Amino acid sequence: MFNPETFVKEKVEEIKNQVKGRAIIACSGGVDSTVAAKIVEMAIHENLLVVFVDTGFMRKDEAKKVEALFRRAGFNYRIVDSSKEFIEALRGVTDPEEKRKRIGAKFIEVFERIAKEFGAEYLVQGTIAPDWIESGGGLRDTIKSHHNVGGLPEKMNLKLVEPLRDLYKDEVRKVARYLGIETAERQPFPGPGLAIRIIGEVDEEKLHIVREANAIVEEEVERYYDFESRPWQYFAVLLPLRTVGVHGDKRAYGYTVAIRMVESLDGMTAAYFKAPHDLLERIAIRITTEIKEVNRVVYDITNKPPGTIEWE
Ligand code: XMP
């Protein structure tokens, strides 16, 4: 039986012996990176810097929530607002893979800058067993590396510390509970964030629209279902398409938002979620009344394959 108390005690001792200098971790506020950070923090205290890079592509209030989590955990942390740099890096870019590449490169650039400033010699990562066990070129690997935005390069020349390498997700959750770390149990969210939920070029206005629309979808779904019965993922996508509508008694020419909800076990395949009409209607009404730029909402009924979960 896995015992979180013994695990933490042993790891903290091991890290005390292993890490003889400053360390840094890029932490998303997710359970893996936060637990990894906490264990290392217990061993080396303020010699660990916990960094959240705010790309500007995060969900509504996400940076604030992450900061509150870091404060509660007692971390020496930095929230780095790099949103201007990230938007700039995407000017004129419409190709999804090019967006991912540029976001990944910018992330590394920002993070390296901070690591240097702090004088870090060690890099902590929240790698867990399933992240590396299937290495050897399976399909899962290809998809993962392709998706792994924020994957930090070996050329950083930092010594790697991976306290959760041997754990599975349920064990990480047990450790989190034991340590009193409450990361919200949220749906999966892609590293490049809202940037790949805006089809085509990203700009501030579109980011605002998709962020608000997404918050409405999350709020309504989470009000409708408890954690166990929620879909695997549920979100909004902003289309680069304007259609005619009416706002009050005026003809309006507004944006279209697509709602995507899917059931899945691991993201590799997915079935579209048979959402009840009253839930969909409530979401559509709220989006079109609360976001004046949007006058049409559609629901995606495509499975994966042939579709993917994200639209980009
Ligand atoms: P797709 O769209 O490929 O998504 O069916 C499968 C799962 O992966 C997530 N996803 C990503 N995660 N970086 C990530 O960290 C990415 O670039 C990325 N693209 C897709 C997606 O949300 C779904 O859970």
Image (tube, rainbow, N blue to C red):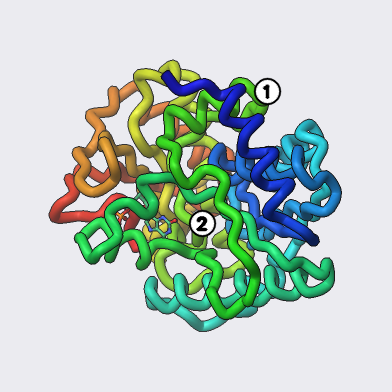
Q: Is residue 238 visible?
A: yes
Instruction: Find the residue positioned furthest to the front.
Output: 17
Q: Is residue 132 above or below residue 180?
A: below
Q: Is residue 241 visible?
A: no
Residue that mark 1 sits on: 180
Q: Is residue 71 above or below residue 208?
A: above
Amino acid at circle 1: Gly
Q: Nearer the viewer, mark 1 or mark 2?
A: 1
The residue at 55%/68% (across/down) is 152
The image quadrant where one finds the N terminus is: top left
Q: Position of residue 271 (x, y in %)?
A: 19, 38
Give the SS element for disc 2.
helix
Give the SS element for disc 1.
loop
Residue that mark 2 sits on: 194
Q: Quadrant of residue 105?
A: bottom right
The residue at 44%/16% (across/down) is 226
Amino acid at circle 2: Leu
